[in-house]
């Protein structure tokens, strides 16, 4: 009986330590502007019927973001965002602008349920 009383706090501390490490591991992949930008860019490209060989990968450039990928037939995909609030983006395929607008609007539209 006494051992179980002493073991309970130890088990609780170990469980909490495990949760803390999981939360800290999720922090870098949990999102933010750069992730929202990438998701919105992919949504736009899919809506435009662009077949992608390499989906856009995004990096930070100064205070903004830049993403690049490739279409199935090798044409460059470029996405740029100044990183301002509200977050906007310009998506080009082979140098032609296919979308210019709000990241939030694209994500909100994609989140709507159709019946």
Image (cartoon, helix red, strand yellow):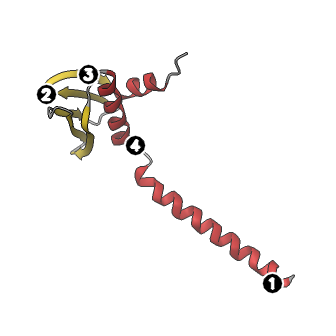
Q: CA distance from mark 3 to mark 2?
A: 13 Å
Q: Do the residues bearing badges 4 and 2 touch, measured as CB atoms within 8 Å?
A: no
Q: CA distance from mark 3 to mark 1?
A: 65 Å
Checking the image for residue 85, the label placed there is none
**Nearest to viewer (mark 2 / mark 1):** 2
Q: Residue at x 52, y 60 (%)?
A: 22
Find disc 1 in the rendering and name its residue. 3
Q: What element does badge 4 sit on? A: loop
Q: Position of residue 78 (x, y in %)?
A: 19, 33
Neighbor class of circle 2 (other Cα within 10 Å; few <14, some 14-19, many 20+) is few
Checking the image for residue 32, the label placed there is 4
Find disc 3 in the rendering and name its residue. 99
Q: Earlier in the sequence, mark 4 or mark 2?
A: 4
Q: CA distance from mark 3 to mark 4?
A: 21 Å
Q: Do the residues bearing badges 3 and 1 touch, measured as CB atoms within 8 Å?
A: no
Q: Residue at x 26, y 26 (%)?
A: 50
Neighbor class of circle 1 (other Cα within 10 Å; few <14, some 14-19, many 20+) is few
Q: Position of residue 2 (x, y in %)?
A: 84, 84
Checking the image for residue 94, the label placed there is 2
Residue farthest to the front, as pictured:
73
Q: Earlier in the sequence, mark 2 or mark 1?
A: 1
Q: What element does badge 3 sit on? A: strand
**Nearest to viewer (mark 4 / mark 2):** 2
Q: CA distance from mark 2 to mark 1?
A: 69 Å
Q: Do the residues bearing badges 2 and 1 touch, measured as CB atoms within 8 Å?
A: no
């Amino acid at each position: 009986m006494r051992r179980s009383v002493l073991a309970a706090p130890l088990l609780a501390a170990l469980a909490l330590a495990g949760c803390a490490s999981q939360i800290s591991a999720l922090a870098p992949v949990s999102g933010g502007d750069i992730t929202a930008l990438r998701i919105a860019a992919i949504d736009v490209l899919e809506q435009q019927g662009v077949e992608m060989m390499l989906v856009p990968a995004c990096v930070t450039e100064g205070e903004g973001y830049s993403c690049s990928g490739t279409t199935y037939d090798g044409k460059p995909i470029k996405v740029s965002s100044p990183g301002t609030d509200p977050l906007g983006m310009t998506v080009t395929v082979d140098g032609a602008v296919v979308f210019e607008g709000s990241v939030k609007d694209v994500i909100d539209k994609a989140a709507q349920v159709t019946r």
